[in-house]
Amino acid sequence: MTSLHVTELNLYPVKSCAGVSVDQLRISEWGPEGDRRYMLVDAAGKFVTGRKFPQMVLLKTQIHPEGISITSPKGDSIMATIPEDAQRIEVEVWRDKMVAAVASSEINDWLSRLLGQELKLVHMPEDSFRQVDREYYAADQRVAFSDGYPVLVTNESSLAELNGRLEESIVMKRFRPNIVVNGTSPWEEDDWNHLRIGEVEFRAVKPCSRCVFTTVDPMTAEKGKEPLRTLAGYRRKELGVIFGQNLVQLNHGVIKVGDSVEIIG
């Protein structure tokens, strides 16, 4: 078996929208720079995801110096620039409440028409702070609009083992990882505690419990029962049905595709 190494790196500029494959990630106090700093909220400020709007996975995103671009499945595109002095509102992600900056009415109207509900695009500014889930990581660590932690790593061997149980194979995009690795046995990532990738050390916080969003095909937005049904049959733990490992960075730096992964403990 080849040594453990990084095979893929991904950013998700807008929570629940399509990801962007990159050659390297710069890890800062936020986790991967540019990852999930934007999200959609409803009229009450509550976060909106692909669980309710599966078609969000078909919205392509790109990061630009002035903001992000969002492209619809039909090819229509809009540039979203939200300055730091934009209107602020209170938004909610799970049990967490924080302040976010709101996009212009032009951008919000475009997205609302596209998804068929009144929505707003918001950006987490530098002076807003959200703490990672303290139930499993007590140290002060900020996170943007991820569900709970700044980094998710998954293992190609685990996906291959899962695909061996499915009637139709699925792709890793279902699980929306930031880091994909290969060169180890299936499910070994469950037991990682401390690892080093490139310039960055990470603490493994807890295996990632998976939800119905994994049943949305990232290429078509169609919703089914897999892989959650099969995973629930043999990967259900106290934390839930798990696939992947949540990480918190211990320092800042760059990680690249091809970097070796050292399991420290």
Image (cartoon, grey):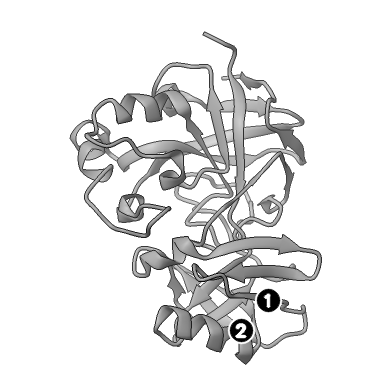
Q: Are marks 2 and 1 in contact (CB under 8 Å)?
A: yes
Query: Pointer 1: residues within 10 angstroms few (<14), some, or many (20+)?
Result: many
Can residue 56 be seen here? The reply is: yes
Residue drawn at 68 percent across, 88 percent down = 87
Farthest-out residue, right? 65
Q: Which numbered dot is residue 107?
A: 2
Mark 2 or 1, nearer chain start:
1
How many numbered marks appear?
2
Can residue 14 be seen here? The reply is: no
Residue 224 location, x and y as percent?
24, 53
Residue 226 location, x and y as percent?
25, 45
Residue drawn at 72 percent across, 85 percent down = 86
Examine the rendered structure and indicate whether residue 229 appears above or below residue 181.
Answer: below
Closest to the observer: 127 or 83? Answer: 83
What's under tag 2, amino acid-wise?
Answer: Ile
Q: Which residue is mark 1?
A: 80
Residue drawn at 72 percent across, 51 percent down = 29
At mark 2, the secondary structure is helix
Q: Is residue 81 left or right of residue 60?
A: right
| Quadrant of residue 55 within the rendered picture | bottom left
What's under tag 1, amino acid-wise?
Answer: Ala
Residue drawn at 52 percent across, 65 percent down = 59
Closest to the observer: 198 or 161? Answer: 161
Farthest-out residue, bottom? 105
Query: Pointer 2: residues within 10 angstroms few (<14), some, or many (20+)?
Result: some
Residue 114 location, x and y as percent?
46, 80
Residue 199 location, x and y as percent?
77, 31
Examine the rendered structure and indicate whether residue 264 appears above or below residue 34.
Answer: above
Measured Cα–Cα span from mark 2 to mark 1: 7 Å
